[in-house]
Image: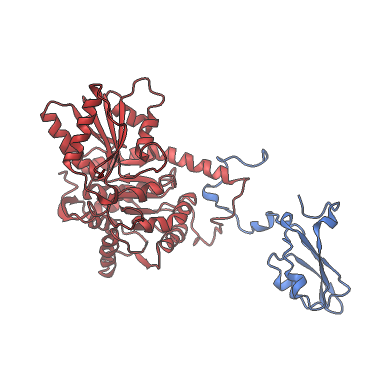
Chain colours: A blue, B red
Amino acid sequence: MEDKKGWKEIPIGGVIEKSGNALNYKTGGWRTFRPVINSDKCIGCMLCYLYCPDSSILLKKDDKFKFKAYEVDLDHCKGCGICASVCPVKAIEMKRETEFKDDKSSGHN
Amino acid sequence: MNAKLKIRKVLSGAQAAAEAMRQIDPDVVAVYPITPQTPIAMQFAEFVNEKKVHTEMIRVESEHSAMSACVGSAAAGARTMTATSSNGLALMTEVVYIASSTRLPIVMNLADRALSGPINIHGDHSDAMLVRDASWIMLASENAQDVYENTIMAVRIAEHKDVLLPVMILQDGFITSHSAETMYLFEDETVKDFIGEYNPKYSLLRTEQPITIGPLDLFDYYFEHKRQQIEAMENAKRVIKEVFDQFSKLTGKTYNYFEGYKTDDAEFIIVTMNSSVGTAKFVADEFRKKGVKAGVVKIRVFRPFMDEEIVKLLKDAKVVAVLDRAASFGSNGGPIFHDVRSAFYESEKKPKMLNYIYGLGGRELSVEMLKKVYSDMVKVNEGIKVEQIQCLGVRD
């Protein structure tokens, strides 16, 4: 906490004076379940990408399907499971975070 | 009367508030009717209908929505006003806190009315006391003239860059809000010049500078924002005096956080706020005629509460009686008593202090009752025991 700014240095009333700041607020630590994508199963329908409330589904270009879901932005994914729920080919599996407790890139900071 | 306060009118406290609002001509008023505030909203709605103001008046479906609309409008940078009473204030309390913590200089007239229940429509201060810790500046009004003047000053206080807190103007429901009395108004131009243009620090409509208002604020910064609010209230102490002094130049009257009436040599002083001040002054005069050195302290600024100022006025008295038109159930005495007594904790010299809970649910405060209060103070001074905290005018 000591590295944070003091009350004289911050704007009043909780105002954030710059836009686009949601990126700086890491919510990955809220997650209990982590979506794990099996890109081999993905058919590139992009439903997960469209439904994700945190824009946390990352796509990559694909020769056959144009785009494929390949990874999750773990800094912002809250583990709601909507992606897994809407996937028509069950290419996303929700796994307990405890299975990844040694993973330093988990977003749990 | 002073040259600037020259328009003589007969107005009720509610109409006086509406007249001040007309002359302030706010950008937005969002209000929901509730007795005894309704005549403020009604009178102002007529001004809107007659195009005497340029105000956008928002008719909402509840007080919660009224204050929410005010928060939105003030966040957009509009000069914003509203009014309420009692349960209306209770319903909007959630947003009353959001308005102050978002640092929006909204000005609200409160026609004080008892909170339910049992349901009651008459004047007491339980509504105001509900939000005394909400970080709103609270100005109290003895009469319609005070309502008018406090409302105009409130705009300047609220919008000051070192304050940026909302201001509430208190008047007693019915007793002040519905009683017509002779009073004096300024010319419209005088008010316009005094309040000036409002240049908001932030505006949601300033698209070239996109901002976020009201974000999630957890353990890492919430406390710092509260610390800023404490500082804003500290700054308000200075700013209120500055605004008072500037306003004095228009009216020729003097204004203070606490205004003493015959307190210079007084031995027995009643401390009270809103309409009871007038009755207390009358009774003090009666006792003066009998040779008792009686005085009255009128609270004009209830929040922030200026400890050192109240001590200055009361320290040489022998006995002080604090009047509370609200109970603080389960604590010793009423809310104003807590403040006044606490202010004296560090003082070497302190008067004896009594507390009277009076006038709940609009129960009349009679001259006889206040005669009893002064008589009690005289008794205490003579060493006769008087119950320190008591209800005044309740049947046994």
Residue at x-position 47% and y-position 57%: B75
In the displayed orientation, state which residue is furthest to the left: B289
Left or right: residue B396 versus residue B238 is: left
Left or right: residue A38 versus residue B261 is: right
Residue A56: x and y in percent read 74, 64
Q: Report the quarter where the C terminus of chain B lies.
A: top left
Residue B17: x and y in percent read 27, 55
Determine the image quadrant of residue B355: top left
Determine the image quadrant of residue B310: top left
Left or right: residue B117 versus residue B181 is: right
Nearest to the observer: residue B212 or residue A99:
A99
Residue B295: x and y in percent read 21, 31
Residue at x-position 23% and y-position 30%: B376
Residue at x-position 16% and y-position 26%: B292
Res. B262 in view? no
Nearest to the observer: residue B236 or residue B186:
B236
Res. A91 in view? yes
